[in-house]
Image: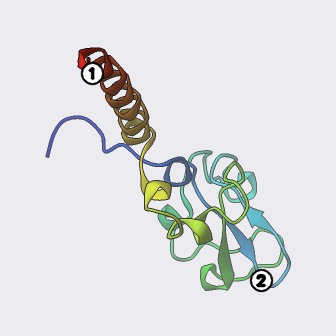
Amino acid sequence: MSDRAKEQTLAEQAPSRYECRACGYVYEPNKGDSKTNVPPGTLFEELPSDWRCPVCGAKKPQFEGIGASSAPSGFQENLNYGFGVNRLTPGQKNILIFGFLALIFLFFLSLYGLR
C-alpha cells in the first residue's frame, strides 16, 4: 500500500456521532466526554468497553450511530443511487469532470479538420 492516505468521500471523512437510546445524549467525537476524561478526537469505537453514558449510565450497546453532524441528511442512504458517481472521491470527480471537458474541447478542435 502507498504512503499516501486513502482518499475518502466527504461522508467518510467526518466521524459519526452516537445517540443514547435511553436518554438522548449525543456523543460527539470532536468534543469527547469531559465527565469521564475522554479527550476530544476519540472515536466512539475507541472508547473503553466499560464506558457509560455520562447522563443516564447506559452501556455502549445502548448507543446508536446517527451519522456525522457535517454530513448532509440522507447522504449515506443515497450513495447507491445514480450511475455510481455518489461513491467517487473528490479527486476522482475532478478527473471525471475535467477529463470530460478536455474530451469535448478535443472534439470541437477536430471539427476544424472537416472540410
* Residue pointed to by mark 2: 21
**Residues at marks 2 and 1, CA–CA distance in whole angstroms:** 62 Å
The extreme left residue here reads 1
* Residue pointed to by mark 1: 110
| Location of residue 54 by image quarter | bottom right
Give the percent coordinates (x, y) of residue 51. 61, 72
Does residue 46 lie above or below 77 as drawn?
above
Number of residues whose C-alpha sits closer than 10 Å to that of mark 1, classed few (under 14), some (14–19) or many (20 or more): few
Callout 2 secondary element: loop
Nearer-the-camera pick, 29 or 57 = 29
Number of residues whose C-alpha sits closer than 10 Å to that of mark 2, classed few (under 14), some (14–19) or many (20 or more): few
Does residue 22 lie above or below 99 as drawn?
below
Q: Amino acid at mark 1?
A: Ser
| Location of residue 56 by image quarter | bottom right
Q: Residue at x 48, y 62 (%)?
A: 46
Give the percent coordinates (x, y) of residue 93. 43, 40
Give the percent coordinates (x, y) of residue 69. 72, 53
Q: Residue at x 51, y 68 (%)?
A: 48
